[in-house]
Image (cartoon, grey):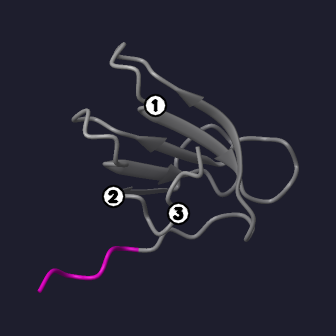
Amino acid sequence: MSEPEEIVETRGDDRVDLLATDTNGDGKPDVWVADTDGDGKADLFQFDTDGDGLVDITMADLDQDGTPDTIVDGDGGHPPTV
């Protein structure tokens, strides 16, 4: 049995995907940027680093100063909706 995935604290309980983009040209999103508190500013950043279409790294910027406050492996309990 695998360990439970670490849950990332976000600024709010909602998720509005602001951006989902394909940076490596394989036709699948590999970067997701989301707003979780409804202020229109990004505070959740997720990356697929191995091209399998799944989130490998999640970063949360709780104070929205441009520096991640939390970084975890996996989707951090917040899978992308796009």
Amino acid tagged 1: Pro
Query: In the current view of this chain or complex, which residue is farthest to the top?
Result: 25
The CA distance from mark 3 to mark 2 is 9 Å
Amino acid tagged 2: Gly
Tell me the residue at 54%/38% (across/down). Answer: 32
- Residue 74's label in the rendered image is 2
Magenta stretch prevailing secondary structure: loop
Query: In the current view of this chain or complex, which residue is farthest to the bottom?
Result: 1
Vertical relation: 80 (above or below) 33: below
Residue labelled with disc 3: 78
Q: Position of residue 39 (x, y in %)?
A: 88, 49
Tell me the residue at 41%/29% (across/down). Answer: 28
Q: How many other residues sit within 10 Å of disc 2, few (<14), some (14-19) or many (≥20)? A: many
The span picked out in magenta is: 1-6
Vertical relation: 43 (above or below) 48: below
Tell me the residue at 71%/64% (across/down). Answer: 11
Residue labelled with disc 1: 29
Q: SS of the residue at dot 3?
A: loop
The CA distance from mark 1 to mark 3 is 15 Å
Foreground of the two, 32 or 69:
32
